[in-house]
Image (spheres, rainbow, N blue to C red):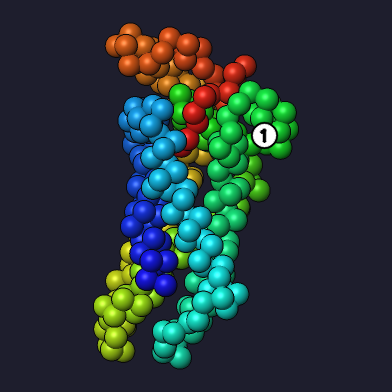
């Protein structure tokens, strides 16, 4: 149980905070968001290794152990106050929602983990996935989130992830014996609650910020012009392969070799 709670905080929770913060940088303009995405992709071929080591495998570990706990495969030895029983139940429910949302999100934006042409064209594209292009970050993300169904799914998913993390911090403190008295648990509850509200604000700002950036054809054209200018500058500086000069988003003739937001 301690490894389960720890994995939810350090690799997974920390990544989610960084991920939402990077996405929210779109509020400072498409150029800022694009530069942040480029900084991530400087890792090149190391990026999948980093993602699997510090993101995907910890998420799978956390999810598998979490399912075992939910199904009763592992005993719940922690005694929660009666007032916290509802939060304990919500922790389980939001964990399931969060995991399903992550699967949807990764497919919707990236087509999961196989970026071969046949997979992207014959499986992902017909199912509406693989929408995000790291070389046209704002325009493709905003377009992918233009529909109300996508917005509804992302709002529910982001809020579930945020609650699961914030409330998980509180339950983690109990699991690790950081706050054992009722008074200490109440104080920790307020701190975790404030953290959750702030993180939810960041996540929703990122969601609606990227939609707003391409809300009209004029805005989308302006964003694409900014992205094209940044690509041109990177190519001239020798920081980007010239083959990316004509990128026009995830619907370009060739799917990007590595397209992780």
Q: Position of residue 29 (x, y in %)?
A: 37, 32
Task: Tell me the residue at 53%/24% (across/down).
Answer: 256
Q: At 33% across and 16% down in the image, what residue appears?
A: 239
- Give how far across and how far down residue 206 sits, in percent: 43, 45
Residue in view at x 57 percent, y 64 percent:
96
From this view, report whether residue 176 is shown above or below residue 81: above
Asked if residue 251 lies left or right of residue 54, the reply is right
User: Seen from this angle, which residue lies furthest front?
Assistant: 73
Q: Is residue 46 above or below residue 74?
A: above
What residue sits 34% from the left and 79% below the top?
Answer: 174
Q: Foreground: 218 or 39?
A: 39
The residue under label 1 is: 124
Q: Look at the image and tell me in which quarter the N terminus lies.
A: bottom left
Which quadrant of the figure has residue 42? top left
Between residues 9 and 105, which one lies in front from this camera angle? 9
Secondary structure of the residue carrying numbered label 1: helix
- Image quarter for residue 145? top right
Q: Nearer the viewer, residue 3 or 160?
A: 3
Q: Is residue 154 visible?
A: no
């Amino acid at each position: 149980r301690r490894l389960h709670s720890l994995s939810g905080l350090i690799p997974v929770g920390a990544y989610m905070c960084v991920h939402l913060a990077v996405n929210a940088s779109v509020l400072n303009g498409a150029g800022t968001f694009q530069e942040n995405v480029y900084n991530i992709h400087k890792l090149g071929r190391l990026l999948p290794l980093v993602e699997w080591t510090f993101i995907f495998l910890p998420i799978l570990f956390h999810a598998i152990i979490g399912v075992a706990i939910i199904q009763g495969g592992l005993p719940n030895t922690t005694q929660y106050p009666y007032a916290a029983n509802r939060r304990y139940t919500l922790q389980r429910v939001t964990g399931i929602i969060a995991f399903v949302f992550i699967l949807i999100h990764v497919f919707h934006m990236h087509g999961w983990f196989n970026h071969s042409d046949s997979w992207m064209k014959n499986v992902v594209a017909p199912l509406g996935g693989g929408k995000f292009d790291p070389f046209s970050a704002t325009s493709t993300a905003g377009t992918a989130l233009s529909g109300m169904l996508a917005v509804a799914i992302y709002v529910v998913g982001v809020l579930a992830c945020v609650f699961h993390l914030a409330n998980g911090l509180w339950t983690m403190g109990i699991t690790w014996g950081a706050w054992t008295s009722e008074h200490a648990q109440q104080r920790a509850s307020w701190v975790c609650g404030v953290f959750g509200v702030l993180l939810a604000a960041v996540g929703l700002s990122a969601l609606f910020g990227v939609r707003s950036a391409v809300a009209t054809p004029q805005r989308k054209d302006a964003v694409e012009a900014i992205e094209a200018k940044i690509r041109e500058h990177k190519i001239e500086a020798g920081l980007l392969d010239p083959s990316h000069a004509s990128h026009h988003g995830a619907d370009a003739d060739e799917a990007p070799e590595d397209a992780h937001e």
